Amino acid sequence: MSDRLLSVGLDVGTTSTQMVLSELTVENRASPFAVPELEIAQRKILCKSPVHFTPLVGENLVDGGAIRTLVEEEYRKAGISRGQVDTGAIIITGETSRKENARTVLEALSDFAGDFVVATAGPDLESVLAAKGAGAAEYSAQTGETVLHMDIGGGTSNLALIRDGKIVETGCLNVGGRLLKLDRNGAVTYVSPVLEGLCSLKPGNRVDPGQVMETARLLAQALEMAAGLREKTPLLEQLWTKESGPVWPAPPAKVVVSFSGGVADCIGQERNWLEFGDMGPLLGRAIRESRLCTGEFMLGTETIRATVIGAGCHSAQLSGSTVFCQNVAFPLKNVPVVNLTRAQQAEPGQVLSGLLRRQDGIAAVALPGLPSPSYREVAALADALAGAMKGRQVLLCLEQDMAKALGQALALRLGREAEILCIDRVKISEGSYLDVGAPVGPAFPVVVKTLVLEK
């Protein structure tokens, strides 16, 4: 079986807003006599929008109406309607995700991605999307090299450490080109609060390139510390974003440093320092002159478009094919996940009841599952889960391939009216959120993401 999905990716970033339209090819890799095993086999980019400046009202408010108009125009240019879109992701990233009306923007744009993802991205999700969209993960998989990917945008730098094509660590620094804005005459118009104590410049100051380079070199030093190329100082802790958890340990000495994001274009070539009305060109120069570029480094196959291509082409995965679904309306969006350990799975009743009581609405339960379970083991697990989840919508994500058997056992215990979805071959970390789209053949498109909607 081969099926094609039309996917839209939209990235509303600190500096820029852009869209890509992609075609995803889903294929059954199993033999005709085996359980279907669906994979996204090909990702083809059909068109890319121009890079638009993210419309703002003042310094703090994203202009939701202007963004909606922009997206409507890009749909028109691409010759598609919302009804033709099968899947997609609208991701609000960087400092824009912290703006006051980010939630309003999400609501205004939600219907543009068909039946799929609309999210304010936390640093984990943004790091993963950028590393995949820039080709860094693929490069690591093909060469066996360990890669440290840095996606340097307007407000933040998202980091991903990649081994053998797998992203093993993510992090984020408040380092970006739009932390300091300038007018065409070289006067400062904006200084981000994250630069407090690090930059003496104030709005209204007339500056020269040397003054801006002082701040740019300081930000480049923080990136060097994150890469393990400079001894850590309190500067790294100050610029490390709190959403990404504690500062990560230094990466191994031998890594290939990879760059994407708008500032990456300023690493590869010299730009007029006032070209974009911010410190991006000088930050790019500071990085090019830093220790990050004295060893092996490369620019991504995509730079400024890395995150949007990651959103449009690489955000979705497919669940296993032995799934069970009863009375569930799709799409499911922004469903919080509660995780059970292998030990808790053995006696899930009490701990699961406590976890679910803390959730106001629906929640998905992620559990390891059982390798090659017997009927008795499936029945025992269904008994325990049914007792804890009776009267609730049952959403289960299992690592092991047993969703259909467990779902059928739960349906026997909870009745035909119960809402039940069991999917497998999906591993979800603690604190994640889940989107599930309408089925593609026997599988379901799934996106696991980190949200910071409360920020």
Image (cartoon, rainbow, N blue to C red):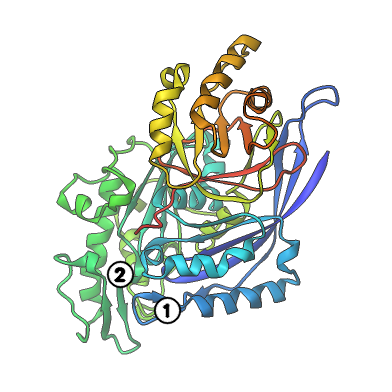
Q: Looking at the image, which is closer to me, 308 or 284? A: 308
Looking at the rendered image, the disc whose residue lies closer to the viewer, 1 or 2, is 1
Is 351 left, or right, of 437 in this rendering?
Answer: left
Q: Which residue in the rendered view is the most extreme toward the right? A: 32
Q: What residue is shown at x 49% (from left), y 69% (from top)?
A: 105
Name the element at disc 2: helix
Sequence-earlier tag: 1 or 2: 1
Is 296 left, or right, of 448 in this rendering?
Answer: left
Crowding at dot 1, Cα within 10 Å, few <14 / some 14-19 / many 20+, comes out as: some
Crowding at dot 2, Cα within 10 Å, few <14 / some 14-19 / many 20+, comes out as: many
Residue corresponding to mark 1: 56
Q: What residue is shown at x 19% (from left), y 85% (from top)?
A: 205
Q: Quadrant of the N terminus?
A: top right
Q: Position of residue 79 (x, y in %)?
A: 76, 72
Answer above or below: position of 69 versus 336: below
Q: What residue is shown at x 38% (from left), y 32% (from top)?
A: 354
Name the element at disc 1: strand
Residue corresponding to mark 2: 179
Q: Quadrant of residue 156?
A: bottom left
